[in-house]
Amino acid sequence: MNHSDLRAKAPSLAAGMAAADHSPDIQLSQTHHRAALVASWRIAHGATVLELGCGQGDMTAVLAEAVGPEGRVVAVDVADPSYGAPVTLGESAARLAEGPLGPCIDFRFGTDVLDPSVDFPEGAFDHMVLAHCSWYFASLVQLRDTLARVRPWARRLWFTEWDLTPTSGDQLAHLLAVLIQGQIEAAGSHGEGNVRTPFSREGLLRLLPEAGWTADDSGSVDTEELQDGDWEIAACLDLAGTEERLAVLPEPVRQLVLSQADVLRAIAKPRGNRALGAYSITAR
């Protein structure tokens, strides 16, 4: 399936997601983004894919469309099916399972691939995908160990994440929101936000060889239509206003976080903040 074919299917794929009942325009932009990614990865009909950090299945749906009825997508997430709002992971998965893509998707929630009981045969998958989920890991060590554990199972890795290096000044609010959240986590106040361990593209490239992967390509990914900048800014300001989360921080760190949150409030727009760009790395 070529790029234009998959992108053309984005509206129907987005309409099949449970979240589209609440925010159809947002769901469409998120699906467009993932359709462009998967099209560029040249994932063929009939392929087998292991997706880590599948969440509500935004990427899962696009992958399932790409591999077709003869392919298979095993979509794994450590979260419980009850996680998420206004649509839970389980509700979103159920909607996909009932649709035309359902037969080739195997959702596995509450699953940690570092658990010895979770195993697949060597070379079971043509592709492994991590898309916009790696900052959710508790640490780079956990990410490295996860990539090492799955290395025998898949022939090729497709990895996409936000890029910490801004290309314009109007991305600085998103960057600051990400760094503040990462700082709070690194200082010992742990939560369940989307940003726990932000790291750079270069950080990932240093980590891959330690996990047994060899990167063979890297490129930038357009995120112009995505709303994640607004979401992370709101999440950061909510977090900075939560005394329970800040109280466990060392006092100098707490004051630094509060001052950075003041700066974020000053530079962020009420809405329409430009998101950071993203990068895609492939490895064998």
Image (cartoon, rainbow, N blue to C red):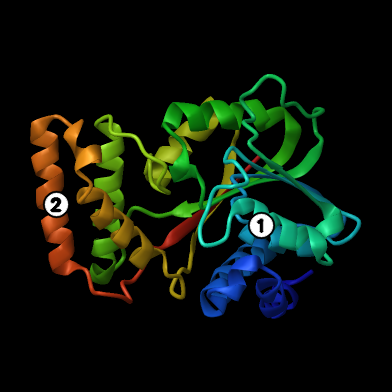
Q: Is residue 132 at least partly visible in the picture?
A: yes
Relative placement, left or right, of 161 versus 44 is: left
Q: Looking at the image, which is closer to me, 172 or 183?
A: 183
- Kindly identify the amino acid type of the residue bearing the numbered disc 1: Glu
Q: Is residue 47 above or below residue 32?
A: above
Q: Is residue 1 left or right of residue 16?
A: right
Disc 2 on helix, strand or loop? helix
Residue 101 at what x, y percent from top left? 81, 62
Q: At 70% from the left edge and 55% from the top edge, which residue is drawn?
A: 93
- In which quadrant of the rendered view does residue 9 lie? bottom right
Image point (34%, 34%), residue name: 190
Looking at the image, tell me whether mark 1 or mark 2 is earlier in sequence order: 1
Q: Mark 2 sits on what residue?
A: 260
Residue at the spot 60% in from the left edge and 64% down from the top edge = 34
Q: Is the residue 268 above or below the residue 87 in the image? A: below
Q: Residues within 10 Å of mark 2 (few under 14, many from 20)?
A: some
Q: Which residue matches tag 1?
A: 91
> As shown in the figure, which amino acid type bears the numbered disc 2?
Gln
